Image (cartoon, rainbow, N blue to C red):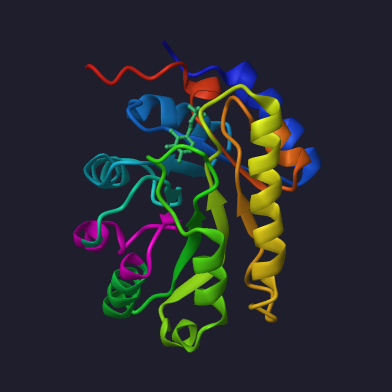
Amino acid sequence: MAVNTQQYLSIINELTDQGVKLIAVSKTKPNEDIQTLYELGHRDFGENYVQELVDKQASLPNDIHWHFIGHLQSNKVKYIAPFVYMIHGVDSEKLLQEINKQGLKQNKIIDCLLQVHIATEETKFGFDGPALHEFLLSQRLSSYTNVRIRGLMGMASFSDNQQLLNQEFTILKTYFDKAKMAFPNGQFDVLSMGMSGDYALAISKGSNMVRIGSLLFGARNYTK
Ligand SMILES: *Cc1c(COP(=O)(O)O)cnc(C)c1O
């Protein structure tokens, strides 16, 4: 199934009006689909798998902003550090340390979002609220010279219970507002929450960056 350009144009208009940034999640999708949106002017794409991202980056235009949105293993940071635009899923200090180290090596500052655990499911990675605030108030924060913490990312439960999603997004927004105070310089301005099924709700709760895959590119097929 090809990329749905009508759907893209309607979503990008809707989001632009609201000041929300769209990350087109292209994991498992072919380069041609990315190229199609690129030709319509889209530059921000999200990927979940390191090898797939490295391959795509090598063969697609240089001015694409690649967002790594998956679970990142520390030993793989080095493969994406040279070109990645933003890492959304920073779910531990150990991972942040490795990103900082690779940033230092590349002589660059890598934009990151801290992933917060908001879903009721056990399987989702991330900081919990108390750990997040402890870290942001700690002296350790200033040792990360080569990462720029730009905000928070969260994934709600895989559910269509609106009340539950509502609660989870509201909690993340509360954490975001509080965490923002640790960065008086204004660098902390991204709240990445919302996907194909729940982005409108996420925006109504304060999201300013959504990660949308299947609505644009069609359902994913992991068996190929
Ligand atoms: C795959 C993925 C998305 C996109 O999901 P859709 O439901 O297809 O929009 C968004 N965020 C993360 C972290 C993902 O892994």
Nearer to us in this view, 51 or 175: 175
Residue 198 shows in the view: yes
Q: Quadrant of residue 224?
A: top left
Residue drawn at x 65%, y 33% is 164
Residue drawn at x 37%, y 40% is 123
Q: Start and end of the magenta stretch? A: 75-95
Residue 199 shows in the view: no
- Horizontal relation, residue 167 to residue 86: left or right: right
Residue drawn at x 34%, y 48% is 71
User: What x and y, as percent, mark residue 111?
Assistant: 48, 65
Q: Quadrant of residue 144?
A: bottom left
From the viewer's perspective, is residue 205 above or below residue 200? Answer: below
- Horizontal relation, residue 50 to residue 8: left or right: left
Residue drawn at x 72%, y 37% is 15
User: What x and y, as percent, mark residue 153?
Assistant: 54, 52
From the viewer's perspective, is residue 4 above or below residue 19? Answer: above
Image quarter where the N terminus lies is top left
User: What x and y, as percent, mark residue 135?
Assistant: 50, 75
Residue 131 falls inside the magenta stretch = no
Which residue sits furthest left?
Answer: 75
Nearer to us in this view, 67 or 13: 67
